[in-house]
Image (cartoon, rainbow, N blue to C red):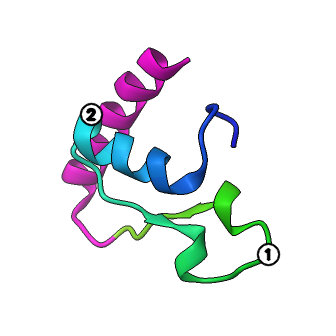
C-alpha cells in the first residue's frame, strides 16, 4: 500500500494510533484486496472531522 504496509496492519495502525476503525479490503473483494481499505461514514460531521484530524496526525507519523 501507499504507506508501506498492507491493508490489515494499516487498519490496525489507524485503530491503535487514531482511534478510527476501518475495514481491510479483503472483507469485500479478493482482487488487490490487500492494498485497499473501506471507510464507513456513519457519525455526525463534528466527530467525522475529528476522526479525519486524528488520521492525519497518525499518517504523518507513519511517513
Looking at the rendering, the stretch of residues picked out in magenta corresponds to 42-63
N-terminal of the pair, mark 1 or mark 2, is: 2
- Classify residue 61 as left or right of residue 16: right
In the rendered image, residue 7, in percent from the top left (x then y), is placed at 56, 54
10 Å neighbourhood of mark 2: few (<14), some, or many (≥20)? some
Q: Quadrant of residue 28?
A: bottom right
Percent position (x, y) of residue 43?
23, 66
Residue identified by numbered label 1: 31
Q: Residue at x 24, y 41 (%)?
A: 16
Instruction: Identify the residue position indicated by label 2 in the image.
Output: 17
Q: Secondary structure at mark 1?
A: loop
Up-down relation of residue 4 to residue 9 (above or below): above
Numbered badge on residue 4:
none
For the image, the number of numbered tags is 2
**Secondary structure character of the magenta stretch overall:** helix
> What is the secondary structure assignment of the residue under circle 2?
helix
Asked where in the image residue 35 lies, by quadrant, the reply is bottom right
Q: Residue at x 46, y 47 (%)?
A: 9
Where is residue 45 drawn, in percent x and y? Answer: 27, 56
Is residue 56 on the magenta stretch? yes
Residue 7: in magenta span: no
Amino acid at each position: 500500500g501507499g504507506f508501506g504496509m498492507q491493508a490489515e496492519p494499516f487498519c490496525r495502525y489507524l485503530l491503535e494510533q487514531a482511534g478510527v476503525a476501518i475495514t481491510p479490503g479483503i472483507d469485500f473483494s479478493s482482487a488487490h484486496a490487500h492494498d485497499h481499505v473501506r471507510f464507513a461514514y456513519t457519525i455526525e460531521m463534528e466527530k467525522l472531522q475529528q476522526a479525519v484530524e486524528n488520521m492525519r496526525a497518525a499518517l504523518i507519523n507513519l511517513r
